[in-house]
Image: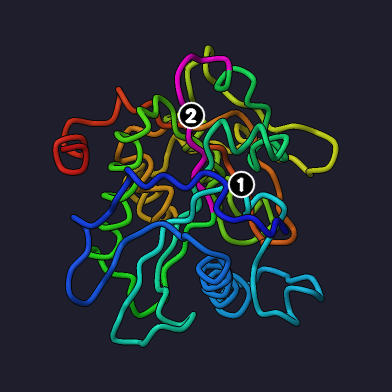
């Protein structure tokens, strides 16, 4: 991991308007901050959920990868829990073109071909590693994170957001209804559509299940909250899903073009 962090510190960007006496919203600004974010991710992904840590992660009790040093890391900090790593209760990982160029690629490109997305003009933003401590999973905290992303998008004039969104459990058969629904109702337009790559990743079909007799409302109700959140703001998905055995999930690629964010959410977050 790089000893120089963050690489792209921007003193002109602030999340102060989303903070109050108890909770602070800001970007990680030191190695210590980054380690606290990674400790939260470890608690959520590996201790609460079913991701599989490496021996080094297990020893350090942190989730980390080669992409982390090139990203901005949004943090929600609860000051009533002191100043240690446990005070970080929410996070989102944000990666723009400059960081991806230094890293060599976006994380999502390890699972999906993004050539059409990345050929579009303007800034792009990869969203990933989103998690919130269990007791803080309230609409208020989620709204702060979404508000933080909206502020970041406006500050850097981001045109397109994307990232991997996970369905829990690494068995594509378990998710065939959800995958078919997403494919039939929320597939990205051809000119921007990513597709799952073969090779390192085991890919899964999205179009095999017959859902004509099923209630779309019931299918959507059972989608993971993060996927539903992206769909609500106008998100669309790529073609194909990828089995991620480390995180015990089936991943789809979500794309949100910021000029197409639905009016309701644009007015709420993009003020």
Distance from Cα at disc 1 to Cα at disc 2: 14 Å
Q: Is residue 49 left or right of residue 263?
A: right
Membership of 122 in magenta stretch: yes
Position of the N terminus by quadrant? bottom right
Q: In this rendering, would 228 be left or right of 47?
A: left
Segment tinted magenta in the rendering: 119-128
Kindly report the secondary structure that dominates the magenta region of the rendered protein.
Answer: strand
**Local crowd at mark 1 within 10 Å, few (<14), some, or many (≥20)?**
many
Q: Is residue 27 left or right of residue 2?
A: left
Q: Is residue 52 above or below residue 176?
A: below
Q: Quadrant of the C terminus?
A: top left
In the image, is residue 269 part of the stretch drawn in magenta? Answer: no
- The label shown at residue 109 is none
Q: Residues within 10 Å of mark 2 (few under 14, many from 20)?
A: many
Callout 2: helix, strand or loop?
strand
Q: Quadrant of residue 78?
A: bottom left
Q: Which mark is residue 70?
A: 1
**Residue at position x 49%, y 80% in the image:** 85
Across and down, in percent, residue 239 comes to 60, 28
Residue plotted at (40% across, 73% down): 89
Work out whether 23 lies above or below 247: below
- The one nearer the camera, 55 or 207, is 55
Residue at (44, 62) in percent of width and height: 91
| Residue to which mark 2 is pinned | 124
Q: Secondary structure at mark 1?
A: helix
Residue 222 coordinates in the image, percent (x, y): 41, 56
Q: Quadrant of residue 231?
A: top left
Q: Residue at 50%, 68% (x, y): give it.
A: 33
Query: Quick one: 28 or 145, which is closer to the camera?
Result: 28
């Amino acid at each position: 991991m790089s000893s120089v962090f963050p690489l792209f510190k921007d003193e002109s960007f602030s999340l102060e308007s989303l903070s109050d006496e108890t909770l602070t919203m800001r970007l990680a600004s030191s190695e210590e901050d980054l380690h606290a974010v990674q400790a939260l991710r470890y608690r959520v992904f590996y201790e609460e959920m079913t991701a599989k840590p490496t021996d080094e992660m297990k020893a350090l009790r942190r989730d980390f990868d080669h992409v982390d040093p090139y990203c901005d890391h949004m943090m929600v900090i609860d000051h009533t829990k002191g100043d240690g790593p446990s005070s970080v209760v929410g996070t989102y990982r944000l990666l723009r073109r400059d960081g991806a160029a230094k890293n060599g690629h976006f994380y999502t490109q390890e699972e999906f071909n993004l050539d059409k997305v990345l050929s579009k003009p303007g800034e792009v933003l990869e969203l990933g590693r989103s998690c919130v401590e269990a007791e803080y999973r309230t609409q208020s905290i989620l709204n702060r994170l979404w508000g933080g992303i909206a502020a970041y998008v406006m500050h850097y004039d981001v045109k397109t957001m994307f990232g991997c969104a996970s369905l829990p459990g690494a068995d594509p058969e378990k998710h065939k209804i959800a995958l078919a629904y997403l494919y039939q109702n929320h597939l990205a337009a051809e000119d921007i559509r990513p597709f799952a790559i073969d090779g390192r990743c085991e890919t899964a079909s999205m179009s095999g299940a017959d859902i004509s007799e099923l209630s779309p409302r019931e299918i959507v109700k059972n989608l993971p909250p993060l996927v539903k959140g992206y769909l609500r703001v106008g998100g669309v998905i790529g073609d194909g899903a990828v089995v991620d055995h480390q995180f015990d999930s089936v991943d789809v690629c979500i794309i949100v073009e910021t000029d197409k964010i639905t009016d309701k959410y644009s007015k709420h977050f993009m003020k």
